[in-house]
């Protein structure tokens, strides 16, 4: 039984189901909280690292652009502090131009364009050599001259004799190096400016940054950083001499830091969730082993006790000394106490049942002896119909022989009448004694049957209900209730399955109660008895009286032991015993009333015999 109790299917209404639901809820809430906590800790950290990586990319881009422009500045610084340049600006010569301003010289310097300007930004000479065709590009040369004339060259040098900046020449972006034209030792008044321009392309920028990059002329439009889930595009403005953007250097880098953060977050969440699930699983298993299984053993033992009725103790586990073991010991102590109390209750119930049985028998014996007491009382108090002295005197006169004939006839008539009255009185006494004999026989049957019923269930036999009703009606007329009662009951036989002695006692009790109710309501009335067949092969005996009746709400109380409607009586065993007796005969007893002063009906239901004659009697 214990195995069946612990192995049954788990439901959320059971303790195990509730614990499992609680653990699952705690695990879910804990997993969510842990995910939020890890996201709150890991995500900002990796976002900060990503921002630092972005700042690093931007700084490296700016450094690369600066380095690119600084190389142009270094080249132009040599041309600025050079006596040949100083003399050329003052007096331009073809020899200088062919030697130091030639395409070969520009190619060696790694620049695309060169120009000399006077201090008033007037042009001395300018040249732009296409690196692919090695031919001059007049359009770019003109764009270069226009740009450097507008540029604040002195501000670009920032107080030094040389400087650099970027310019936009149409769709071309170039780094510009500018230097003052001085003597080789750096002395002398500046005679103008020497400018070198080197175009920067997307390929060159990508080579400098070691990542795919591109250079787009114009100011940036929108955000400088555009990111997706896996890649990130960074745009770095390329500023001109007036610190305004002239181009945008953009490149795309993978979001390795962000991806690493996401992977670490999911790994941390997954690992912590698995660990939490393992902890909860182990906890659930330990709760099942240490709590639920022992409780299941206790429940199974309780089920076994309930089914078998045997208060056996629960086998104890000597290895355990926790609260569950203490509960088992307390449970065993309770079972031992209950067993002792059950034995005491059984002993008391046996004594009480024997006492109640004796009281019930005495109650039925009293009902049966009431007519005997009434008949004996009436016989003791009944006087002779004619005074014995008068009869003796009349006989003496008749014996004297000297009585006149008229007197003799009167005396003879008197004696004959006296003898006739004596015969009638004797006949009435004999009838009453027969009723008393029947009552005494019923008392003896009650006492004899009680000894048999004390040890076994009352046997049922086929009885004539009409005969039992007539016999008890005759006895009830001599019950001494003082009421004038008219009895009406069927004349034909009605067969039922009952114990004749018990049924006679039940009917006698009901007749006695009806007679008392009629006496309490005024002293005269009637008791009508009907017998009819009902559905299901039963017979119903209805006993209706015109007595005082009762409140229908108090109907269930009438069958309680100790309850009585008579203020001068106590005990109330009659109806209680009658109901139990009817139940023992596989029948039932019910009481009905329309209210106080409107009489009552007692309905007895018994099984009908199964043979055809009984059915014929019921139909008749």
Image: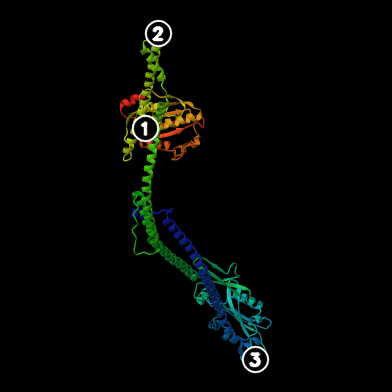
* Label whose residue precedes the other's in the sequence (2 or 1): 2
In the image, 273 versus 499, the foreground residue is: 499
Q: Quadrant of residue 249?
A: bottom right
Is residue 166 rendered to the left or right of residue 402? right
* Residue 531 visible in rendering: no
Q: CA distance from mark 3 to mark 2?
A: 213 Å
Q: CA distance from mark 2 to mark 1?
A: 65 Å
Q: Which residue is mark 2?
A: 404
Label for residue 187? 3
- Closer to the camera: disc 3 or disc 2? 2
Helix, strand or loop at mark 1 = helix
* 393 shown above or below 321: above
Is the Cβ of the residue at disc 2 closer than 8 Å to that at disc 1?
A: no
Label for residue 503? 1
In the image, 339 versus 175, the foreground residue is: 339
Q: CA distance from mark 1 to mark 3?
A: 153 Å
């Amino acid at each position: 039984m214990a195995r069946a109790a612990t192995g049954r299917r788990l439901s959320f209404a059971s303790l195990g189901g509730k614990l499992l639901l609680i653990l699952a809820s705690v695990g879910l809430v804990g997993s969510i909280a842990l995910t939020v906590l890890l996201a709150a800790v890991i995500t900002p950290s990796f976002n900060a690292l990503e921002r630092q990586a972005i700042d690093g990319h931007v700084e490296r881009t700016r450094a690369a652009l600066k380095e690119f422009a600084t190389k142009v500045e270094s080249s132009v610084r040599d041309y600025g502090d050079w006596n040949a340049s100083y003399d050329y600006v003052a007096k331009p010569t073809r020899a200088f131009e062919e030697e130091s301003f030639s395409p070969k010289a520009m190619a060696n310097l790694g620049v695309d364009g060169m120009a000399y300007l006077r201090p008033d930004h007037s042009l001395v000479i300018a040249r732009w050599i296409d690196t692919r065709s090695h031919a001059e590009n007049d359009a770019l040369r003109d764009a270069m001259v226009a740009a450097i004339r507008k540029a604040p060259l002195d501000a670009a040098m920032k107080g030094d004799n040389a400087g650099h900046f970027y310019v936009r020449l149409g769709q071309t972006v170039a780094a510009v190096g500018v230097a003052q034209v001085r003597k080789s030792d750096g002395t002398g008044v500046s005679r103008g400016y020497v400018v070198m321009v080197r175009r920067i392309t997307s390929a060159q920028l990508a080579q400098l940054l070691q990542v795919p990059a591109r250079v787009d002329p114009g100011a940036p439009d929108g955000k400088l950083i555009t990111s997706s889930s896996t890649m990130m595009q960074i745009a770095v403005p390329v500023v001109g001499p007036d610190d305004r953007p002239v181009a945008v250097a953009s490149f795309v880098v993978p979001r390795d830091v962000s991806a690493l953060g996401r992977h670490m977050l999911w790994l941390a969440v997954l690992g912590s969730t698995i660990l939490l699930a393992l902890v909860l699983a182990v906890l659930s298993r330990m709760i099942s082993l240490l709590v639920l299984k022992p409780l299941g053993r206790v429940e199974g033992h309780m089920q076994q006790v309930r089914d078998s009725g045997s208060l056996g103790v629960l086998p104890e586990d000597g290895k355990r000394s926790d609260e569950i073991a203490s509960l088992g010991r307390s449970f065993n102590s309770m079972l031992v106490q209950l067993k002792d109390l059950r034995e005491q209750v059984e002993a008391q119930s046996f004594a009480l049942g024997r006492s109640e049985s004796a009281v019930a028998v005495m109650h039925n014996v009293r009902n049966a002896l009431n007519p005997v007491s009434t008949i004996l009382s009436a016989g003791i108090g009944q006087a002779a119909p004619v005074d014995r002295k008068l009869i003796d005197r009349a006989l003496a006169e008749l014996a004297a022989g000297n009585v006149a004939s008229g007197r003799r006839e009167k005396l003879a008539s008197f004696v004959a009448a006296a003898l006739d009255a004596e015969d009638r009185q004797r006949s009435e006494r004999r009838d009453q004694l027969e009723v008393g004999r029947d009552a005494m026989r019923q008392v003896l049957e009650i006492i004899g049957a009680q000894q048999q019923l004390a040890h076994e269930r009352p046997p049922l036999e086929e009885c004539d209900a009409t005969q039992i009703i007539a016999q008890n009606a005759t006895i009830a007329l001599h019950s001494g209730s003082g009421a004038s009662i008219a009895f009406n009951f069927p004349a034909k036989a009605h067969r039922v399955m009952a114990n004749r002695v018990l049924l006679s006692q039940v009917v006698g009790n009901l007749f006695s109660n009806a007679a008392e109710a009629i006496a309490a309501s005024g002293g005269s009335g009637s008791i009508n008895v009907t017998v009819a067949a009902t559905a299901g092969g039963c017979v119903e005996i209805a006993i209706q009286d015109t007595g005082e009746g009762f409140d229908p709400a108090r109907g269930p109380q009438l069958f309680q032991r100790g309850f009585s409607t008579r203020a001068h009586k106590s005990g109330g065993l009659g109806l209680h015993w009658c109901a139990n007796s009817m139940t023992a005969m596989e029948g039932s007893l019910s009481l009905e009333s329309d209210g106080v002063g409107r009489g009552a009906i007692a309905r007895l239901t018994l099984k009908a015999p199964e043979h055809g004659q009984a059915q014929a009697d019921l139909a008749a």
